Image: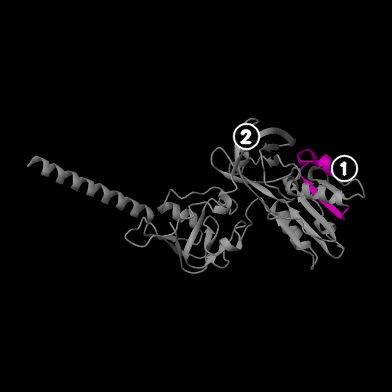
């Protein structure tokens, strides 16, 4: 009698274990089981950016101007880049910040970036200045280029302060090719302007460079720099937003303008899609209201604190989420056209209607 009973217990126990394992596998495939499984969530990072992540060794650190630190990041088999490109640096705290590459594109073993300490910033530049030292490794993503040097008959660059970093490789390239170019370079003082000595040497032939130190002669004359532009002249600008606004206002009609921003552009709060709406979090089954003056990120994190984010300005891509339903008002400077079709950066982008459904 004991043997058949033991056999029955073993069979029942085994069947229960197999059933439990099968159920766990089914739930893992779909958190909303028994509903149909959803695709894998974006969860704050896209495949495009994840595949480009690598760790590089800081082999050089120097101060190239007052409050400006330059880092040399070495590694093997680094992707090539062209002037205007930038890297994402993942800082020790987890913050992600973007810095333009200012070294030599032909140097395949290292990337060079420079950053100014912003005393009243959000902490990224201070972390670079205080924690990133020679001998440490740092994770980088990229490079990517939203500010490429395009073909033109002539070039005019208007730059403020640390905005010289993406422009410097362009100037080296144009100087080597014999192209027609001019630069208006402004800053608070000559000591605060990175790479000033090299730039003045590059422009020594033909008085191509005009340096304007605010403590000596005031603000640069943008209108004069953009007056009487030759046909087919491309204008490039990088620096504080007031400088870029001044360039856009003074630019004669018919000349292409290329801008590189280090912070989010100030938008019109009453623009399309700026009103209140609601966001459904499909996986968790919750719906959260988003007020007119509130970001989707802030509203979502009140209900789902685990959602990842970093820059809160639409640059780093950490908060990227898949959109299942609704019309997106994209306000970022990062996503490709393909990515914009079904995802958004919830730190800056909004809804053009009354409702969005996120894969969260």
The spot of residue 14 in percent (x, y) is: 23, 46
- Specify the farthest residue to the left: 1
Inter-mark Cα distance, 2 to 1: 30 Å
Instruction: Find out whether residue 192 is within the magenta segment.
Output: yes
Asked whether, in this view, residue 26 is left or right of residue 262, the answer is left
Q: What is the x, y in percent for residue 84?
A: 72, 51
Label 2: state its secondary structure.
Answer: loop
Q: Which one is nearer the viewer's eye here, 99 or 74?
A: 74
Q: Which residue is mark 2?
A: 132
Q: Nearer the viewer, residue 10 or 282?
A: 10
Dividing the picture into quadrants, the one containing residue 104 is: top right
Residue in view at x 53 percent, y 65 percent: 328
Q: Residue at x 72, y 42 (%)?
A: 108
Q: Earlier in the sequence, mark 2 or mark 1?
A: 2
Around disc 1, counting alpha carbons within 10 Å, would you say few (fewer than 14), some (14 to 19), or many (20 or more)?
Answer: few
104 relative to 351 in the view: left or right:
right
Q: Quadrant of the C terminus?
A: bottom left
Seen in the picture, residue 208 relative to 72 is either above or below; the reply is below
Magenta region, residue range:
178-201
Which residue is rendered at x = 9% and y = 40% of the image? 2
Is 25 left or right of 52, judged from the image as shown? left
**161, 41: nearer the viewer:** 41
């Amino acid at each position: 009698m004991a043997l058949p009973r033991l056999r029955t217990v073993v069979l029942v126990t085994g069947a229960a274990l197999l059933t439990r394992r099968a159920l766990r596998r089914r739930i893992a495939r779909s958190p909303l089981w028994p509903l149909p499984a959803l695709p894998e969530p974006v969860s704050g990072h896209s495949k495009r950016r994840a595949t480009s992540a690598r760790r590089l060794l800081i082999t050089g650190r120097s101060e190239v101007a007052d409050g400006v630190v330059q880092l040399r990041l070495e590694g093997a088999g680094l992707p090539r880049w062209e002037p205007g490109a930038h890297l994402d640096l993942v800082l020790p705290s987890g913050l992600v910040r973007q810095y333009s590459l200012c070294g030599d594109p032909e140097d395949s073993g290292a990337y060079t970036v420079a950053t100014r300490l912003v005393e009243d910033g959000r902490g990224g530049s201070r972390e670079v200045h205080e924690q990133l030292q020679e001998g440490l490794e740092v994770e980088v993503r990229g490079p990517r280029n939203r500010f490429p040097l395009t073909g033109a008959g002539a070039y005019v660059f208007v730059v403020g302060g640390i905005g010289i970093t993406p422009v410097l490789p362009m100037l080296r390239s144009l100087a080597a090719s014999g192209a027609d170019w001019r630069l208006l370079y402004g800053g608070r003082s000559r000591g605060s302007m990175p790479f000033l000595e090299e730039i003045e040497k590059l422009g020594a032939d033909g008085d191509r460079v005009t340096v304007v130190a605010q403590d000596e002669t005031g603000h640069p004359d943008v209108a004069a720099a953009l007056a009487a532009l030759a046909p087919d002249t491309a204008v490039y600008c990088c620096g504080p937003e007031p400088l870029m606004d001044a360039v856009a206002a003074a630019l004669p009609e018919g000349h292409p303008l290329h801008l590189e921003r280090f912070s989010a552009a100030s938008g019109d709060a009453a623009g399309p899609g700026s009103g209140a709406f609601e966001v459904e979090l499909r996986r968790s089954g919750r719906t959260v209201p988003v007020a007119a003056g509130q970001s989707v990120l802030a509203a979502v994190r009140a209900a789902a604190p685990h959602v990842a984010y970093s820059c809160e300005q639409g640059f780093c891509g950490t908060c990227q989420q898949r959109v299942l339903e609704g019309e997106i008002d994209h306000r970022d400077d990062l996503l490709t056209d393909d990515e914009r079709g079904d995802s958004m950066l919830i730190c800056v982008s909004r809804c053009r209607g009354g409702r969005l459904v996120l894969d969260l």
